[in-house]
Amino acid sequence: MRFLIVVLVFCSALFARIDIIELSEDMPFGEDISWLRMANGALYIDHTSVYLSSKNNIYIQKRLTPGKVEVWSTQIKNYRDYTIMRVLPVEDKIYFNLILGNGRFYLAGIKKGSGQVLNLVERHGFPGRMIGFDNFIYVGGLYWSQYGKFLDKYDNSRGEKVSEDDIQKFDSLFDLQPGFTLCAYDDSLKLIDPVNKISRSSVNAKSFMSLYLPQPYDIDKSGEIVLADNVEGYFIKRYDEKHHYIDQFEVINDHYKELPGVLSKESAITLKSTKGSYSAIYAVYEKEKFVISSFYQSGAPQNLPEPPYYYDISTKGGEHVTSGSLGFPLVGEDEEDKMFFYISVEGGWFENDRIFLVGMSVEDILDGQASTEFINEAVTGFMNRRTDPNDHK
């Protein structure tokens, strides 16, 4: 009995180190919000709240009072049909990336407490995570600054049939201008500095873009940027706070399937339609001296990637610490030391699935707490405590 008590106390201490947030039923669920969309910036967690978006609404759930959900409805003049893809609260504003009914991506912002959109700026390109640091708004995702103008000139948005000549002229964009995987904007959403030029061009670049690969990155407290661009392989790159390149290191993982150095339209279509044909790095987080990165094997079209999700922990200097696999994907971080896993628990009859965000530090992961068994046990214990009739006595 004495041994049992010690074990129970020890287990309680372990679980106390992790953070579990259950998303309220009033938050967006199902097709409106996937874990992959969360991992690319649709989820934001700060000291007090969890932010998610669906359609033209921003949902804010308090961490200490999860039943309380605020819904901020945004308005854009002349547009009713649009979807907010990524969110970033910064002081008295919330910035976001959205797709309008015209099929194009834009950046915008609102003042907290007001739904009126400010500074609507076109930024055509697959949207990525947004981070605010030192008066900059950083936006990840592949980006060609002239993409929108080339669409206007050569795409079928004019209501005319696109000719072969138009297609060739549009494709010339990828020869004339380099693409980037990260951009820095000022607080009015004026583009200040594109960061991390990609090495592919011409048809190779256009075909690469068609794969819609995530472009994960993170920024430490000094402003140093760490990123993986999926372009050349499994490399982690570093830039200083002035966006100057520092160095890079390769992460060695036997499960990583590198993309061909040269892609054609046909080879990109084959890769997209073949499950598990390549790896995609979807998460990069900087935590003190460590960088944790995670990738998945490509999924079949229209389906979310499936476990296992492979991960690697390295030092900032590129030294390998450990590698492993996860049963649950990483989808975000808070403003301290926690990274959060996405766990869906199937609901019963006439009940929605329950969604949990389980946060832990790099040290917790190194201690083995990111195992499927440990996380499932922690979530089950959390659910039991919430339903215990004696819990609030």
Image: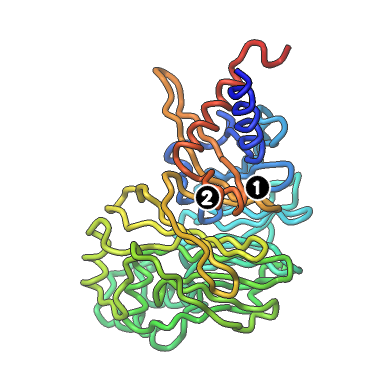
Whether residue 189 is situated above or below residue 7 in the rendered picture: below
135 vs 78, nearest the viewer:
135
Q: Quadrant of residue 190?
A: bottom right
Q: Name the residue beneath numbered marker 2.
A: 331
Q: Residue at x 24, y 79 (%)?
A: 164
Q: Quadrant of residue 259?
A: bottom left
Whether residue 92 is situated above or below residue 263 in the rendered picture: above
Q: Residue at x 51, y 56 (%)?
A: 40
Mark 2 and mark 1 in contact? Answer it, CB < 8 Å: no
167 vs 123, nearest the viewer:
123
In the rendered structure, the answer to whether residue 50 lies left or right of residue 320 reads right
Q: Name the residue beneath numbered marker 1.
A: 45
In the rendered structure, the answer to whether residue 302 lies left or right of residue 50 reads left
In the rendered structure, the answer to whether residue 132 lies left or right of residue 57 reads right
Report how far apart the C-alphas of labels 2 and 1 lie in the structure: 10 Å
Secondary structure beneath label 2 = strand
- Residue 149 in picture, x, y percent from top left: 47, 76
346 vs 317, nearest the viewer:
317
Three-letter code, disc 2: Val
